[in-house]
Amino acid sequence: MKTIKNIVIMGLLSILSLSGCKKFLDLAPISQTNGNNFYQTAEDMKNALNAVYGALQYPGMYYSSMHIIGDLRSDNTWIPNPNAGANLQEVDEFKNNAFNSISSTTWSAHYQGIQAANIVIDKIDAVNMDEDLKNQYRGEAKFLRALMYFNMVRIFGDVPLVLEVINNPQEGYAYGRTPAEEVYAQIVSDLSDAEGALLYEYGNADIGRATKGAAMSLLGKVYLTQKKWALAVQKLKEVIDQTTLNKYQLLPSYASVFGIANENSKESIFEVQFKKGSSGEGSPFTNQFAPIGSGTAVTSLGNPLGQNIPTDNMNAAYEVDDVRKDLSMRTSYVVNGNTVMHNYVAKYLGVPAANLDSDNNWIVLRFADVLLMYAEALNEQGYVADGPAFAYLNQIRNRANLLSKTSNHVTPALRIADQGAFRLAIEHERRVELAFEGHRWFDLVRTDRAMAVLESIGMQAHHVLFPIPNSQIEINPGVMTQNQDYD
């Protein structure tokens, strides 16, 4: 018999057994049997909302899937050692099919999170609580639902658009794949609602919650992905204008953006919160990204898994004197007095409390990303020699200790003479500025550059989308269909 557990398009009421995230998530387990009767008070709704945030920590989201897809799928990182995992290596080499666990884990986790968000949105109206807090919680749930659907539509294309709480298995069979444009319309609607309901900042106890700026920034990225340049320019400029109110800023030093001591800074707009030593709340990145065989040379505790290793091509992408390189990646480590030449990611180094249990957050949106998106959208509206788009691009470069690029620079590498050249300059700058933060694959697909960049390492045209998990097609044959050219 097919159960709710099997039909992952529905999400699971068991999402509510998630424990919370660092600083503000402290959810106690809620059983499935009393779920529909549980939501009576503001505290109940807080717990339900915290479960949505908790879903972001799932392996199928920001614990592992989003960097596997965002970086490993691209030319940024690779799997040099097959012991790092066959499913990951298949994604890396464009050999993944409908049975690969990355697709199924990603699909399942996102729909569990969407189900949890739908519960909040559905139940909160009936709860007697402060109206401002009710609007805030609803806005947070809509932001998180939009983020999850944005991931899904970019990864899989047409996906089931589920906006109601699924209460029994039979309801799940009604959902086939919704056209991507309809999914995007709902994302825009959710983010617009969230923007109107959320605050720019919260007290220390609530750091990490979705803010108005997070909704605006994500909406700007959605418009950019849809190639709606004017809307992207408008929304991203609204975020940039918040610097005058000290809401966000490009920090003076790239080094001050990363590391446990620098989390949730003025440059960070939205982070997934992790906390080591808290019953599964820790992040795995320190161990995941350490080379196999490195022992304790890279990570002081736990097993080095070698799952997201920078390519030599990525290493060569940095210009001479770019301070971001050594802060983002390393090219060697020392074991027993011997130097081993091996690339590895350095942005997420920490001291684990146990294996796969560190404090490092995952930054989803930060201000440097907004500045580069804004420059890109301005250029798409029309190239202006040494215009505002140049100024925003060069803000990022100058912080990295690099010279500004101009329209007629005497040095060819610093010259951007036309719109096409500016596109490539932005592509390069995003690659090195946002390295290993899960953006590269999505950037290449969004700009229709994936085939040009990745065909030489195995990409074919149909790989712009991941395969729908075979389990979903078997559960709902005739309704759930596969993406083109996947078995």
Image: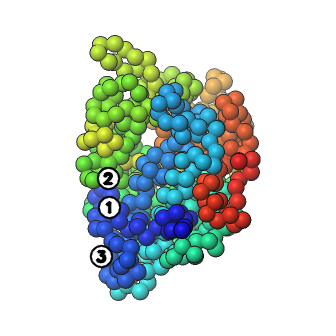
> For the residue labelled by badge 3, is the local secondary structure a helix, a strand or a loop?
helix
Provide residue 116's location: percent of width, then percent of height.
45, 69
Looking at the image, tell me whether mark 2 or mark 3 is earlier in sequence order.
3
Q: Which of 407 and 197 is in front in this view?
A: 197
Q: What residue type is labelled 2?
A: Glu
Q: Eyeballing the image, is 56 above or below 427?
A: below
Looking at the image, tell me whether mark 1 or mark 3 is earlier in sequence order.
1
> For the residue labelled by badge 1, is the local secondary structure a helix, a strand or a loop?
loop
Q: Distance between the residues labelled 1 and 2?
A: 8 Å
Q: Eyeballing the image, is 126 above or below 87?
A: below
Residue identifier under label 2:
281
Query: Disc 1, disc 2: CB below 8 Å?
Result: yes
Q: Eyeballing the image, is 333 above or below 416?
A: above
Provide residue 330's location: percent of width, then percent of height.
42, 25
Q: Nearer the viewer, residue 8 or 1?
A: 1
Q: What residue type is labelled 3?
A: Glu
Residue identifier under label 3:
43
Task: Check residue 19 in the rendering and tell me which mark sits there, or answer none.
Answer: 1
